[in-house]
Image (tube, rainbow, N blue to C red):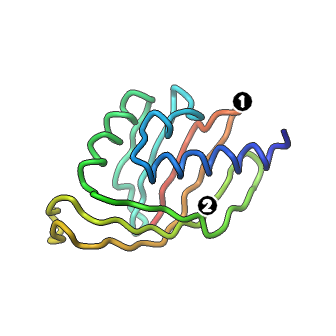
Amino acid sequence: METKEYYTKAVESYVNAYNRFDINGMCVNLSKKIVFENISGGNAEMRIEGIENFKKQAETAKAYFSERHQIIENLSFNGHVATAEIDYTGILATDLPNGMKKGDTLKLKGISEFTFENDEIVSIRDIS
């Protein structure tokens, strides 16, 4: 399989599993040493290292939303990095400290960078 085709399938698989709240599915193409970073407004809000820590955080995050949906608007490639432009919508399942309430809809546009090494995703950077 061609590299871009493989990267596309891996990213789409991750996003589809995310939309289904399927943590095991999200982890199919991840390295055991995965590094996940969430960057908001230029600030690193979260950094997680290792597949077990990633799974724990994903389980915690599931509880925040009754529905969530990422749509890949565009996917581009630069070497071993696939960059997805994401349109995100989520419906809160709980009140958040920032004042948003259960049932509120969260809409974001952002970028997710997936870095590959040896046919595995070694890092994901969510940037909004």
Q: What crowding class fits label 2: few (fewer than 14 Cα within 10 Å), some (14-19), or many (20 or more)?
A: many
Query: Of 65 and 55, which appears nearest the observer?
Result: 65
Q: CA distance from mark 1 to mark 2?
A: 20 Å
Q: Residue at x 79, y 49 (%)?
A: 4
Task: Name the residue tied to disc 2.
Answer: 84
- Res 56 quadrant in image: top left
Residue 95 location (% of width, % of height): 14, 63
Q: Residue at x 64, y 33 (%)?
A: 120
Residue 10 location (% of width, % of height): 65, 43
Looking at the picture, which amino acid does disc 2 mark? Ala
> Considering the image in quadrants, where does the C terminus appear?
bottom left
First-in-chain label (1 vs 2)? 2
Q: Secondary structure at mark 1?
A: loop
- Res 57 quadrant in image: top left
Query: Of 44 and 12, which appears nearest the observer?
Result: 12
Residue 9 location (% of width, % of height): 69, 46
Task: Name the residue tied to disc 1.
Answer: 118
Query: Of 128 and 65, which appears nearest the observer?
Result: 65
